[in-house]
Amino acid sequence: MEYADILHRCFRCGYCKLPGNYVDFNCPAYAAFRFETYSPGGRMWLLRAWQDKKVEPSRRFQEILFSCTACGNCVEQCALPKIKDQLLLVFTAGKAALVEEGKVPPSVRDCLTRLQQYGNPYGLARKKRSGWMVDTGVELFSDQEFLFFPGDVGAFDSRGQEIARSVTRLLARLGVSFGILGDREVSDGNEAAAMGERDLFTLLAQENIEHFNELKVKKIITLSPHGFNALKNEYPALGGVYQVFHYTQILADRIGRLEFKDAPSKLTVTYHDPCYLGRHNREYGSARKILAALPSVEIREMARSLKDALCCGGGGGNLFTDVLGGGPESAARIRVAEALETGAEILAVSCPACAVMLGDAVKTANVEDRIQVREISEIVNDRL
């Protein structure tokens, strides 16, 4: 297994599962199960035991590895400078070794199979990918300035489709010139890579890159932070070199062009930092700049925010595989409870996966009368 030579260096100090202010556990898997093996340090020792042939990759072993959401909190908090940047690479390499041996949880196997056969984790026909754009006025890409990349959740999930329509409506109002790939788009591959299926990631990425280059795409706006991460950081090595923006970055730069109606009352909002926008790519300011520009909006930060934000639990493919589950100790439920503590009326998100995870958690916890999950562009559109 790649990176096996550093497994012995972890001495399980435990900082990896905490936020910077130590207020609670910040590893979604450890918070859900409270067994040390589900913590990053525990995984390091478990992988070492596997390498030393002291344990077998049982079903529980597989679930422990694939419960990692790749949120990056362990990288942020690890006390060992020489290994911290390799932690997620170690866990992904462990998953890759299990994939190679065909020893993965059934839900992971099925998700990867759908990605391979259909080009998306939902197992839906490619011709349905552009269904969200009906009656929106969104056009296929030809010679526009930007390609808009809605990704899998934006294209296929009903909540994600609402967000894709909201964002494109606002982009059009701001005069942004953009088009989409439509049915030729496939998954950005970020989740395949996070689940250890690097070859599948490469196939998906190369298909997108082929279309991008054929159309002479130069600039891309992504709906999902996951897609932003893949296109910005992973595609260049495969020949896909573009200027990649998350949609909040485009909106933040142009928010001053909008005119807002007088707000009848103050709106209290707390913002959830998505892992692939925040910790993975150090983008914390754009969403907050947008919210701060809205009239009569008060931003209330949660106890864990910015680099210490708790993951919603949907990363690493967990939105589709549900290895973590959705009980009272799930990351999404904990995050909603934390948002409620601020007294905010709105839990704002800038990631369609976070919108799905946290929206479901609000419903499950029966607190819809106390807080709503709203995406940034929806909040802006409501105030125009």
Image (spheres, grey):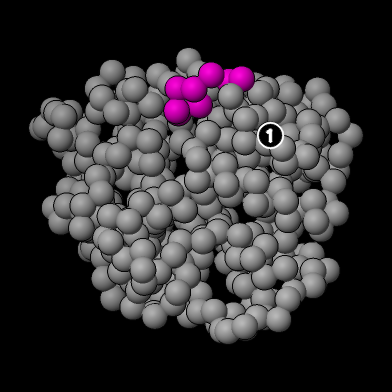
Q: Name above or below for residue 175 compared with residue 92.
A: below
Q: Is residue 135 left or right of residue 124?
A: right
Asked whether residue 90 appears in the rendered view, the answer is no
From the image, which quarter does the C terminus lie in?
bottom right
Residue occupying image coordinates x 20% and y 58%: 328
Q: Nearer the viewer, residue 51 or 68?
A: 68
**Amino acid type, label 1:** Val
Residue 93 in the image: state x and y as whole percent: 37, 34
Tell me where residue 342 appears, x and y as whole percent: 39, 79
Q: Which residue is mark 1?
A: 134
Residue at image coords 45%, 74%? 345
Residue at image point 85% right, 46% down: 177
Q: Residue at x 48, y 15 (%)?
A: 117
Q: Residue furthest top?
A: 117
- Looking at the rendering, which quadrant does residue 295 occupy? bottom right
Q: Residues within 10 Å of mark 1 (few under 14, many from 20)?
A: few
255 displayed left or right of 56: right
- Establish if 18 lies above or below 241: below
Asked whether residue 369 is in view, the answer is: yes
Q: Is 123 part of what is drawn in magenta?
A: yes
Q: Which residues are magenta?
A: 120-127
Kindly give the residue lying farthest to the left in the view shown. Answer: 54
SS of the residue under disc 1? loop
Residue 325 higher or lower than 12, as above or below: above
Check residue 205 for magenta coloring. no
> How many tags in the picture?
1
Magenta residues, dominant SS class: loop
Front residue of 261/228: it is 261
In terms of depth relative to the viewer, which is nearer, 123 or 203?
123
In percent of width and height, residue 81 lies at 41, 60
